[in-house]
Amino acid sequence: MIFLLEDDESIRKLVVYALQSQGFEAAGFEKPSEFWHAMSRKLPELVLLDVMLPEEDGFSVLKKLRAATATAAIPVIMLTAKNTEFDRVTGLDGGADDFVSKPFGMMELMARVRAVLRRAEKQPSEQQWQVGPLFVCPQRRQVQVNGREVVLTYKEFEILSLLLQQQGRVLTRDVLMDRIWGLEAERENRTLDVHIRTLRQKLGEAGGLIETVRGVGYKLGGQA
């Protein structure tokens, strides 16, 4: 099931129809209050979330989704008529899995939906990691260094988890951008490097576990 929160009726009907024509179950909601009521009865596999909404904006809805244990892992694609870098960074750092600017083509949107769902299916089953002073529990979204709690943004946590899943393997910049930011990733920007730098700083003495492989990408632990 895919939930769409979009106040524009024409867009809402068109997207729901397109999703259903592609074999997805889909439901559309005009207001956040309607969306939250539906969420209390059934959780979707993916949320398509408009930014400009009545009652509360999409960033607020996203923040609530990521803050609740039951909905923290639900993939979210944000839809917006605003295409500024600030809005994209706000959405992606807030935990959005992808970001689509209006007007968008339905074929592109369907491709992004399928890509995000594929990435979600590849998430590991329940596990936790202990590497030196670093402890990470994905299910509780908990990070500790020598027993001290470390607070990460959604994207920082996703980067760390992906590096832990592939311990000892070098992950190229393209792989990290595709897996963390999806189709919207711009290969020439420094978003990944900035996130890695901030992540290392927050991890303190455990930050050194994340190694830079010059000209290729990054890895955490193990042999090259």
Image: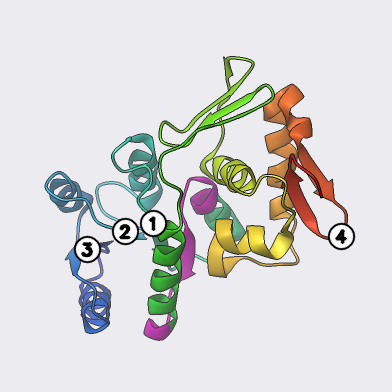
Residue 101 showing in the rendered view: yes
Relative to 175, is 208 above or below? above
The magenta span reads: 90-107
**Which SS class for mark 2?**
strand
Q: Classify residue 119 as left or right of residue 70.
A: right
Name the residue furthest right.
214
Amino acid type for the residue under numbered disc 1: Val
Q: Earlier in the sequence, mark 2 or mark 4?
A: 2
Label 4 vs 1, first from the N-terminus: 1
* Outermost residue toward the front in this view: 223
Q: Indicate the secondary structure of the residue bearing disc 3.
A: loop
Residue 10 lies left or right of residue 118; in this view the side is left
x and y percentages locating residue 183 in the rendered image: 55, 70
Whether label 4 touches label 1, CB < 8 Å: no
Which residue bears the numbered disc 3?
1
Residue 60: image location, x then y, percent? 37, 43
Dot 1 alpha-carbon crowd within 10 angstroms: few under 14, some 14 to 19, many 20 or more = many
Q: Secondary structure at mark 4?
A: loop
**For mark 2, what is the residue?**
47
Q: Which numbered dot is residue 76?
A: 1
Closer to the eye: label 1 or 3: 3
Query: Which element carries disc 1, helix, strand or loop?
Result: strand
Q: Pointer 4: what residue?
A: 215
